[in-house]
Amino acid sequence: MKVAILGAAHQHVDYALAEVAQRDELELVAASEPDPQLRERFLSGISVPLYDSPQRLLEAHDVDVALIAGIYSQRAEATVAALRASAHVLADKPLCTSLPQLEAIREAAAESDRHVSIVFEKRFYPATLALRRLVADGTLGTIAMIASTGPHMLNQSTRPAWFLDPATYGGIAGDLPIHDIDLMLDLVAEQQGATPEGTVSAHVGNVRAKDHPGFDDHVALLLRAGDVLATIEANWLGPEAAAVHGHYRMRVTGSRGTAEVDWAYHRLTVTTHDREIWDEPLGSPQRSAQYFFDALLADREPKITTAASLLATEVALKAQRSSGLRGAPQPF
């Protein structure tokens, strides 16, 4: 199975490199990135042909899987090009930065009959897998509410100019909350037995505007999916003296109990109506993209499906649109 990297603006190119290193069935055949500095930073250690555009790479090579990890505003074009070349797409988040871009990807995916899967690695963290077991076995009862928080360190001095520019970054609502949006939608779909419909609204702000005038640094979402309500907040205000890049947490409240996930410190604490608080045992971690290649090599659909990837992206982008409309709810 031939793998290519289309865009390398983030260390998440390692999603593909780690799998190629682990699996004899995979071969990295080429990579593309138009920015020389990004090529040097993220692709200098690989010994395959390098191209300055996805189109040139795809004209020169047959590709089975394309990893999309370029500058955010360029990802949609690379994704569509890969799908039209009959390659499956494994994408870093965000998949794209606008709803028209998302529609182009949706159409290309339908026409190509290829998978588009965003690496929502939180789904496969040991604490998340343990949470899913609790939900599945009824320990928490019926989910009523979810609350999550996602602080991130900005480390502005290390950020490239494109990252702080809304034209190339997109917006914070379309970026940081998407992992928790996906996880909520997936938990609700599993509980209700169908893909949930709902609404999303969001507000953003820029409390450090003197440092980055056009770059919103915090966001709060209110999300309803089916009968479940969620509040999701995320920011680029994580304390830079903190021990972790982000103290990511989620609380799931059900009719029978509450579970609190602490991803940064690898804990899942649970309390129910008939049992005092306990730490749920956790299993072993998985590689971030392991799920995707396990599925392809077994000729089955990845657990993070095209539909799930596109839905989470749609909700995140509609949250971004809501933030420009003073929080007006957006249906999905």
Image (cartoon, rainbow, N blue to C red):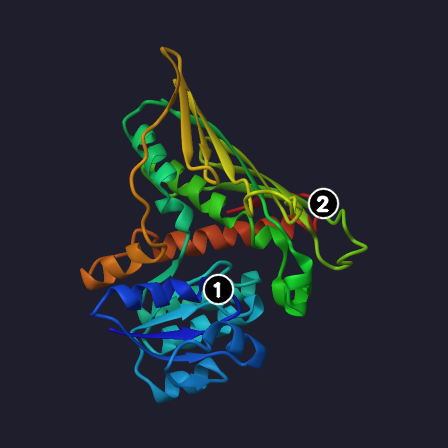
Q: Residue at (50%, 69%) from the top-left corner?
A: 75
Residue nearest the viewer, comparing 277 with 244: 244
Residue 62: x and y, percent?
30, 82
Quarter occupied by residue 34:
bottom right
Q: Is residue 120 above or below residue 170?
A: above
**Residue 164 as seen in the image, left or right of residue 117:** right
The label shown at residue 11 is: 1
The label shown at residue 143 is: none
**Residue 152 as seen in the image, left or right of residue 53:** right
Q: Residue at (35%, 40%) from the top-left corner?
A: 126
Residue 244: x and y, percent?
54, 44
The label shown at residue 326 is: 2
Single out the residue that lies furthest toward the right. Answer: 210
Is the Cβ of the residue at disc 1 closer than 8 Å to that at disc 2?
A: no
**Residue 264 visible in the displayed image:** yes
Residue 114: x and y, percent?
31, 67
